[in-house]
Image (cartoon, rainbow, N blue to C red):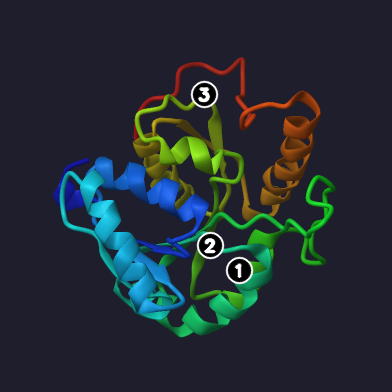
Amino acid sequence: MTTAQKPTIAVLGGTGDLGTGLARRWAKAGYALLIGSRTADKAEAAATELAAFATSTKPRGMANLDAAKAGDVIVLTVPFANAPALLDEIKAAVQGKLVIDTTVPLMPPRVARVQLPPEGSAAVAAQIRLGEGVRVVSAFHNVAAHKLAEIDRPLDCDVLVFGEKADDRAVAIALAEALGVRGLHAGPLANSAAAEALTSIIIGINRTYKADGASIRITGIPAVPKS
């Protein structure tokens, strides 16, 4: 995929740990990036730091709503508790667009306990909130943020991608490959409950075994061709 073919990615909540890690690797891979935050000043500062990793268009920072309006593909990287307000804020701006939701329903203090929302998963809750005019895909739940931030560090894991349409999942799979990991079609959005729940389980495993960001890998499938 050439630079001209790559969509502009708006990372909402892009000043947090996960957003920062994803943005660094996508900037290095040549994607044009918009960093969104609750305040434009904070986003602009993050975009300035991100420029050191960019191999193509200089990243730009702006308020979340402005980033949602300007981006081709929207990536949500905010905590579960903050997601509803942000979804309501950007709903009109993302109609007709692809939204990739990374949200995991972690509920402190028991973040190592699976606690899925009444809708079945955070991704399904996001789809309901945004409405049928938005295509929601769910991905990037089980990649350690601190490993993403170290952009030259190999990532030994897979990314499970959930969504109703294969073409939409393929966009997220291409973004996973740009991070240096394998993305896998994992079925409809409702299946996101499995990956969201796994995050809590992995947190518990990390604590028990003092692991430095354990993750998952699917074995026994043939080599997956690059997107």
Q: Amino acid at mark 2?
A: Val
The numbered mark, 1 or 2, whose residue comes first in the sequence reads 1
Give whichever of discs 3 and 2 has the lower sequence position.
2
Amino acid type shown at disc 3: Asp
In the structure shown, which secondary structural element does the residue marked by tag 2 occupy? strand
Using a 10 Å C-alpha cutoff, classify the residue at mark 1 as few (fewer than 14 neighbours), some (14 to 19) or many (20 or more).
Answer: some
Label pair 1/2, CB-CB below 8 angstroms: yes
Checking the image for residue 68, the label placed there is none
Q: Which residue is labeled 2 in the image?
A: 136
> Which of pointers 3 and 1 lies earlier in the amino acid sequence?
1
Identity, as a three-letter code, of the amino acid under mark 1: Gln
Residue 174, located in which quarter of the rendered image?
top left
Q: CA distance from mark 3 to mark 2?
A: 26 Å
Query: In the rendering, at what x and y percent does residue 143 appear?
Result: 55, 38
Question: x%, y% of residue 57?
Answer: 16, 55
Q: Relative to residue 173, is residue 75 depicted above or below?
A: below
Q: Report the residue at 61% width, 70% height from top.
A: 83
Residue found at x 15% / y 49%: 56
Within 10 Å of the Cα at label 3, are there few (<14), some (14-19), or many (20+) other Cα atoms? few
